């Protein structure tokens, strides 16, 4: 996924950050915080630990900046580190259900009462369904379906073949569909409601 065009000159910031410029570090952090938080939350699941994992991803990235050769876009390189941190944590975490209110609050990039209320209906269902997936399937689904990476990009981020990625995404979709059939309450929550929100 290309770095978004805009105000920031990512290449210049990365060069400055490699020379340990603290202002450049802060700018890269601010520019990428929402993305890193979203990916960690979707792969690991909503939890107070997400904030620590986001920090870990940035610490690992900034420590590794001297090794960044620019063969890939900075956003791709950072995504690879973020996925690795989130997957490592998700694999060692015991699976447990997440209360829906906590799921909604944690899954929104910058929680506010208005954004939480607007996102509540679909987001709580999505979070519950993602939480039922095994970490490897969840990561594949998040990257290729929710984050919009191509098959090849998502496979590269996960260090697997394109075919393996497709299998994981297919299995994730089947599991989600099965969950929706077995939990009519979740399916109902996805349906439009007649009453005002």
Image: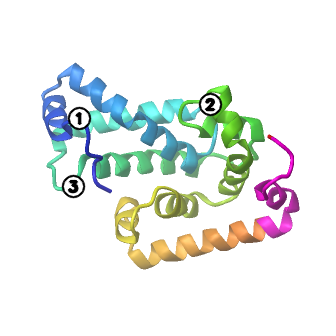
Do tag 1 and tag 2 residues touch (Cβ < 8 Å)?
Answer: no
Q: Position of residue 154 (x, y in %)?
A: 40, 63
Residue closer to the observer: 97 or 193: 193
Left or right, 54 with respect to 59, comes to right
- What residue occupies the far top of the structure in this picture? 22
Do tag 3 and tag 1 residues touch (Cβ < 8 Å)?
Answer: no
Q: Nearer the viewer, mark 2 or mark 3?
A: 3
SS at circle 3: loop
Q: Position of residue 2 (x, y in %)?
A: 28, 54
Q: Quadrant of the N terminus?
A: bottom left
Number of the label disc, if any, that sits on residue 164: none
SS at circle 2: loop
Left or right, 177 with respect to 112, comes to right
Residue 163, quarter of the rendered image: bottom left
Q: Position of residue 162 (x, y in %)?
A: 40, 75
Do tag 2 and tag 3 residues touch (Cβ < 8 Å)?
Answer: no
Neighbour class for label 3 at 10 Å: few (<14), some, many (≥20)? few
Q: Nearer the viewer, mark 1 or mark 2?
A: 1
Q: Is residue 125 visible?
A: yes
Q: Give the labeled residue for mark 3.
A: 72
Q: Give the labeled residue for mark 1.
A: 8
Magenta residue check for 66: no
Q: Which residues are magenta?
A: 180-196
Disc nearer the start of the sequence (2/3): 2
Residue placed at 80% from the left, 40% from the top? 197
Q: Give the labeled residue for mark 2.
A: 48
């Amino acid at each position: 996924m290309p770095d978004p065009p805009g105000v920031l000159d990512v290449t210049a910031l990365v060069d400055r950050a490699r020379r340990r410029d603290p202002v450049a570090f802060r700018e890269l952090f601010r520019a990428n915080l929402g993305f890193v938080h979203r990916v960690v939350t979707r792969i690991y699941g909503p939890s107070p630990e997400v904030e620590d994992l986001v920090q870990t991803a940035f610490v690992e990235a900034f420590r590794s900046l001297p090794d960044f050769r620019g063969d890939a876009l900075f956003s791709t390189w950072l995504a690879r580190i973020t996925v690795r941190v989130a997957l490592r944590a998700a694999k060692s975490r015991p699976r447990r259900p997440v209360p829906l209110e906590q799921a909604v609050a944690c899954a929104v990039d910058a929680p506010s009462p208005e954004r939480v209320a607007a996102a509540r209906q679909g987001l709580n269902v999505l979070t519950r369904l993602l939480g039922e997936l095994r970490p490897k399937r969840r990561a594949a689904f998040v990257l290729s379906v929710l984050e919009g990476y191509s098959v090849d990009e998502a496979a590269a981020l996960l260090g697997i073949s394109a075919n393996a990625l497709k299998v994981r995404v297919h299995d994730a979709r089947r599991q989600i569909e099965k969950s929706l059939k077995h939990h009519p309450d979740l399916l109902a929550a996805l349906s439009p409601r007649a009453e005002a929100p």
